[in-house]
Amino acid sequence: MAGQLIVRFTEHQSYDINIDAEVVRFMATMSSGSFWSDVVLEGPRSLRRDREEFKTTVIDLLQAGQHPCYVELSGEELH
């Protein structure tokens, strides 16, 4: 199975005291590193939207040959 890439998608929710809000960190981990994104959790609907956008963006970046990095999503993000 040459050319196969294994990616593990995970997410972690936590409270950020600096912005007084719940946040979610999305990660796509591979043997070569991780893509990640931090977003403010606005509710279940935004979580599903952000999760899907993250996965789609990471797959597009991998297909383009991008090295692991921070992924900027269109929703409200933390930096």
Image (cartoon, rainbow, N blue to C red):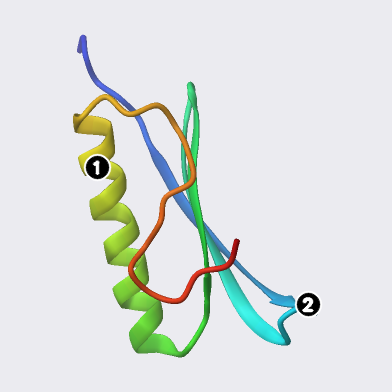
On the rendered structure, is 50 left or right of 62?
Answer: right
Label whose residue precedes the other's in the sequence (2 or 1): 2
Q: Position of residue 66 (x, y in %)?
A: 32, 29
On the rendered structure, is 14 left or right of 65?
Answer: right
2 in relation to 43, above or below: above
Mark 2 closeness class: few <14, some 14–19, many ≥20 residues within 10 Å: few
Residue 59, numbered circle: 1
Quadrant showing the N terminus? top left
62 in relation to 46, above or below: above
Please tell me which residue lies in front, 35 or 78: 78
Q: Residue at x 35, y 70 (%)?
A: 50
Q: Residue at x 60, y 75 (%)?
A: 23
78 in relation to 9, above or below: below
Q: Find the residue positioned furthest to the right.
A: 17
On the rendered structure, is 6 left or right of 19?
Answer: left
Q: Residue at x 27, y 32 (%)?
A: 62
Q: Residue at x 30, y 25 (%)?
A: 5
Spatial separation of the CA atoms under disc 2 and disc 1: 31 Å
Give the residue pinned by disc 2.
18
Quadrant showing the C terminus? bottom right
State the SS at label 1. helix
Please tell me which residue lies in front, 4 or 79: 79
